[in-house]
Image (cartoon, grey):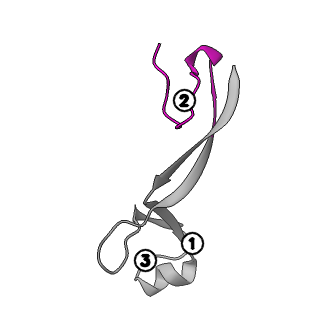
Amino acid sequence: MVAGLLVAPHSRVRVRLTDGQAAGLGLSPGVGYTVTGTLTNLNDTAVELMTSTPMTVPARWLHPLDPDGSARRS
C-alpha cells in the first residue's frame, strides 16, 4: 500500500453561520446552520480552490511517468 495526497481543484464551499447571522436571516438561534454551495466571482464564474485529500492505494495501481509528466502505458 502507498499513502499519498490527492490534490484537486473544486468550487464547493460550506460556511457555518453564527447565531447572530442566523438571527439576521430570521432563523432560530441555537439550531446550527450551514450554507453550502458553489463559490463564484461577480461574473458568475466558479472560483477554483485547491484541496488535498489523504488516500492510500495499492502499489500495483501506480505507473511511472514519462519525462513530460504523462502516464506511461504498458
Residue drawn at x 45%, y 18% is: 73
Q: Is residue 44 left or right of residue 54?
A: left
Residue drawn at x 52%, y 68% is: 15
Q: Are marks 1 and 2 in contact (CB under 8 Å)?
A: no
Residue drawn at x 49%, y 23% is: 72
| Nearest-to-viewer mark from 1 and 2 | 2
Instruction: Please rate how many residues cluster around mark 3, counting C-alpha atoms within 10 Å: few if below 14, some from 14 to 19, many from 20.
Output: some
Q: Is residue 62 above or below residue 74?
A: below
Q: Are marks 2 and 3 in contact (CB under 8 Å)?
A: no
On the image, numbered disc 2 is attached to which residue? Answer: 66
Q: Is residue 34 above or below residue 8?
A: below
Is residue 62 highlighted in magenta?
A: yes
**Mark 2: which secondary structure?**
loop
| Nearest-to-viewer mark from 2 and 3 | 2
Which of the 4 quarters of the picture holds residue 47? bottom left
Query: How far is disc 1 from disc 3 in space, using C-alphas?
Result: 9 Å
**Along the viewing direction, whichever of 38 and 28 lies nearer the viewer:** 38
On the image, numbered disc 3 is attached to which residue? Answer: 27
Residue 16, given in percent of the width and then of the height, sits at 54, 68
Q: Main secondary structure of the magenta part?
A: loop
**Mark 3: which secondary structure?**
loop
Is residue 56 highlighted in magenta?
A: yes
Query: How far is disc 2 from disc 3 in space, using C-alphas?
Result: 56 Å
| Residues rendered magenta in the picture | 54-74
Residue situated furthest left in the rendering: 44
Residue 27, given in percent of the width and then of the height, sits at 43, 77
Q: Is residue 71 left or right of residue 37?
A: right
Q: Is residue 41 left or right of residue 22?
A: left
On the image, numbered disc 1 is attached to which residue? Answer: 30
Q: Earlier in the sequence, mark 2 or mark 3?
A: 3
Residue situated furthest front in the rendering: 67
Residue 58, given in percent of the width and then of the height, sits at 62, 18
